Image: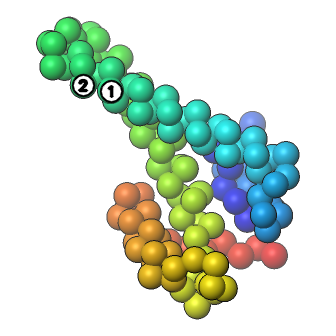
Amino acid sequence: MRLLPWQGADGKPCYLDTDADGSSFLSRLADNVEAVQLGLGRDLLARIRRYEAEQLLSEDDLRVVVTHLCTALADVLRVAESRGARVPDADEDEGGGNADDAVRLRQAVQSITGRAFVRRDLS
């Protein structure tokens, strides 16, 4: 099950029972949405750093910036959680990747999200 980078109409998380290679239309759409979200967050951070260095932000501007940063951070954390959920457990690694890397990535996602990783196996 893949956590999608958007919510349902009721505000609840959306999940996709995805194919093994992630080639379905919805998987590719989710990949593209995640890429856009990460790119927007990266651009926002670069712009804010530039404004901060040049001291171009008023107090009102800072309020708006904080709102946008919170939105971008929420998007990035959702992407991290989704990608962490798709990292195979060390004992599930079928030789296609490095099990130690999978464990390190899972630990990094846990430290970023502040939540214990829970594998969702709904099959």
Describe residue 102's horizontal placement relative to residue 56 as left or right.
Answer: right
Residue 8 vertical position relative to residue 99 in the rendered view, above or below = above
Horizontal and vertical percent position of residue 53: 15, 19
Residue 57 vertical position relative to residue 20 in the rendered view, above or below = above
Using the rendered image of the protein, determine whether residue 66 is visible from the camera's viewpoint. Answer: no
Please name whichever residue, 100 or 79, is drawn nearer the observer in this view of the structure: 100
Residue 46 bears which disc, if any? 1
Residue at position x 42%, y 40% from top? 73
Using the rendered image of the protein, determine whether residue 23 is visible from the camera's viewpoint. Answer: yes
The amino acid pointed to by label 2 is: Arg
Describe residue 110's horizontal placement relative to residue 83 as left or right.
Answer: left
Horizontal and vertical percent position of residue 58: 20, 9
Callout 1 touching callout 2 (CB < 8 Å): yes
Horizontal and vertical percent position of residue 98: 51, 79
Q: Quadrant of the C terminus?
A: bottom right
* Residue located beneath label 2 in the image: 49
Other residues around mark 2 within 10 Å, as few (<14) / some (14–19) / many (≥20): few
- Dividing the picture into quarters, in which one does residue 120 lie? bottom right
